[in-house]
């Protein structure tokens, strides 16, 4: 019976349990934020992609810079 009472009064693992619960809450919050923001970032990336798809970028060669007027 003395061993059982010692086991019930021992709090050495309580800090570990607190850290595990805190870490699980932070990970859960991070997943929730990524889930809610993920759709908006995908839509934004698609809008930027479609805006840039028709853009023509002029190219220059080294001879264009060395030409004398």
Image (spheres, helix red, strand yellow):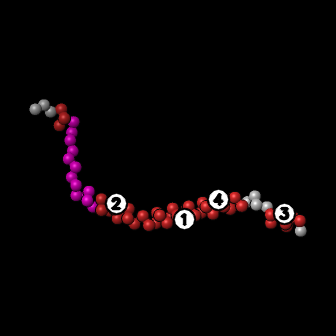
| Element marked by disc 3 | helix
Q: Is residue 13 above or below residue 61?
A: below
Instruction: Using the rendered view, name the quadrant where residue 63 is placed.
Output: top left
Q: Which residue is mark 4?
A: 19
Q: CA distance from mark 4 to mark 1?
A: 14 Å
Q: CA distance from mark 2 to mark 4?
A: 37 Å
| Element marked by disc 4 | helix
The magenta segment? 49-62
Q: Earlier in the sequence, mark 3 or mark 2?
A: 3
Residue 53 falls inside the magenta stretch: yes
Q: Earlier in the sequence, mark 2 or mark 1?
A: 1
Q: CA distance from mark 3 to mark 1?
A: 35 Å
Instruction: Using the rendered view, name the quadrant where residue 43 is placed.
Output: bottom left
At a point 26% along the width and 59% down the height, the residue shown is 51
Q: Earlier in the sequence, mark 4 or mark 3?
A: 3
Q: CA distance from mark 2 to mark 1?
A: 25 Å
Query: Which residue is outermost to the right?
Result: 1
Badge 4 density bin: few <14, some 14–19, many ≥20, Cα 10 Å = few
Q: Which secondary structure is most common in the magenta stretch? A: loop
Q: Earlier in the sequence, mark 4 or mark 1?
A: 4
Q: Which mark is residue 6?
A: 3
Q: Which residue is mark 2?
A: 45
The one nearer the camera, 45 or 9, is 9
Q: CA distance from mark 3 to mark 2?
A: 59 Å
Discs 2, 1 touching: Cβ within 8 Å? no
Foreground tag (2 vs 4): 4
Instruction: Using the rendered view, name the quadrant where residue 42 is placed.
Output: bottom left
Foreground tag (3 vs 2): 3
Discs 4, 1 touching: Cβ within 8 Å? no
| Element marked by disc 2 | helix
Q: How many marks?
A: 4
Q: Which residue is mark 1?
A: 28
């Amino acid at each position: 019976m003395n061993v059982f009472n010692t086991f019930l009064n021992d709090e050495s693992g309580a800090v570990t349990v607190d850290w595990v619960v805190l870490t699980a809450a932070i990970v859960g919050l991070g997943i929730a934020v990524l889930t809610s923001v993920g759709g908006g970032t995908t839509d934004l990336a698609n809008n930027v992609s479609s805006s840039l798809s028709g853009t023509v970028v002029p190219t220059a060669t080294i001879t264009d810079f060395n030409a004398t007027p």
